[in-house]
Image (tube, rainbow, N blue to C red):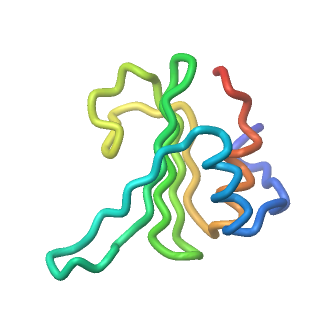
Amino acid sequence: MSSAEAVAPVFDIETGLQELVARGYQFVHPADERGEVVAVVGVRVHDDVVDVVRLNAEDDVVATRMPGTEENIFEPERWLWRRRGDGAQVLTEILSLPDAC
């Protein structure tokens, strides 16, 4: 799929998160100095890639697929695929990627 193509949202955020968990994503919830959660971050390592999904807000989600050789998965130097935008759209797109690249 080219970056210009858009996938119509299939998953709402709750359903998308449930599907990520079903596919083996592990989640962390980074907090600020007051203990307030600032994001929900899911990571899945599979085949020779790492997928990371960061939900900052319902309309601010970033999903990245990178080579498994990346040293810092939260600030990768290279990625194979990346999207940022509305949660339902981004979750639909990452869930539509094939497992292997």
Task: Please give left or right for residue 9 compared with residue 76 in the image.
Answer: right
* Tally of marks: 0
Locate residue 54, reporting x and y percent. 46, 58
Pick the residue in front: 62 or 24: 24
The residue sitting at 17% across, 82% down in the picture is 34
| Residue 63 position (above or below residue 38) | above
On screen, residue 32 versus residue 88, left or right, reads left
Q: Residue at x 67, y 45 (%)?
A: 22
Quarter of the picture containing the N terminus is: top right
Give percent across and percent down for residue 60. 52, 70
94 sits to left or right of 65: right
Identify the residue at image location x=31%, y=44%.
75
> Does residue 52 lie above or below 9 as drawn?
above
Of 69 and 31, nearer the camera is 31
Up-down relation of residue 71 to residue 18 (above or below)? above
To which quarter of the image does residue 28 belong?
bottom left
Counting from the top left corner in percent of width and height, residue 33 is at: 14, 76
Q: Position of residue 59 (x, y in %)?
A: 58, 75
- Residue found at the very far left of the displayed protein: 33
Q: Quadrant of the C terminus?
A: top right
Q: Is residue 71 above or below residue 8?
A: above
